Image (tube, rainbow, N blue to C red):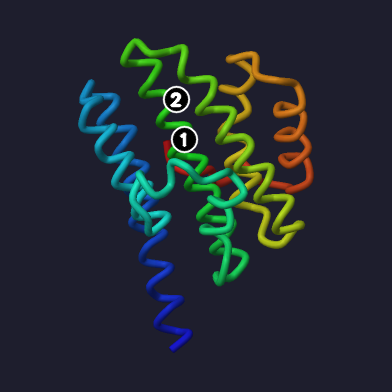
Amino acid sequence: MASQREDYLMRLLAQLRELVASLGRLRAAGRHAEALQLLLQAQERLFGRTVAELAPLSLEAQLDLLVTDVPAPVAAEKCALYAALLREVAATYRERGAAALAPAALALAAQVVLAAAGRLRGVAPEPLAAAARELLPAVEAEGLPCELREGLQRLIEKVPGAGAAPPPR
């Protein structure tokens, strides 16, 4: 039974990685409305909840949904994928003329990565450190608070080779 669950989780993560990659391709093609629809679908798939159910939840409650009852490596990957989705939200906002909304999405992505790293306490940190490496340039460019920048930098420095396989753009 555990093997079936692990297989399901691995397939889910692979599908979500492909969805994140598709988002970048849609944005590059100027298909922003489709990208936003796919973002919502990916978020619902990641959490197993509708956007309406997720909207009122705190970051802590969202993280609970991502990390509870799954192995640490899966939890780390799910949190890294959530950060990648939020990074895509920020890029889509910027490209659609709503750049003022981008910093909030990037800040939330950074908070997801840092909070997840704290919860998992060094267990399976590679996906989170890779997500931090992907986020850091955008966080710096947006001039987000130094505690976010410094937290991401510390996470990157703790994991040698963390940038080798960042979440897809």
Number of marks present in the image shown: 2
What secondary structure is marked by label 2? helix
Q: How far across and down, in percent of the image, does residue 127 sit? A: 59, 51
Q: Which residue is mark 2?
A: 90
Say which amino acid is labelled 2. Ala
Q: Which residue has dot 1 on it?
A: 86
Tell me what residue is drawn at x 64 percent, y 52 percent: 126
Q: Amino acid at mark 1?
A: Leu
Q: From the viewer's perspective, is residue 22 above or below residue 159?
A: above
Where residue 74 is drawn, which disc sits there? none
Provide residue 102's location: percent of width, then percent of height. Answer: 47, 20
Residue lying at 36% horizontally and 24% vertically, measured from the top left: 92
Q: Residue at x 43, y 13 (%)?
A: 99
Farthest bottom residue? 1
Q: Is residue 98 above or below residue 132?
A: above
**Within-10-Å neighbours for mark 1: few <14, some 14–19, many 20+:** many
Circle 2 packing at 10 Å, graded few (<14), some (14-19), many (20+), is many
Q: Quadrant of the C terminus?
A: top left
Question: Image height check: is 150 above or below 168?
Answer: above
Q: Quadrant of residue 90?
A: top left
Q: Nearer the viewer, residue 105 or 55?
A: 55
Q: Residue furthest front?
A: 56
Residue, x 41% and y 31% (percent of image)? 88
* Image marks 2 and 1: residues in contact by CB distance under 8 Å: yes
Give me the C-alpha separation between circle 2 and circle 1: 6 Å
Q: Could you say where residue 75 lies in the image, as x and y percent from the top left?
A: 57, 60
Q: Secondary structure at mark 1?
A: helix
In which quadrant of the rendered view does residue 132 lie? top right
Q: Residue 9: percent from the left, percent from the top?
A: 43, 68
In the image, taking residue 33 as reference, residue 157 lies left or right, namely: right
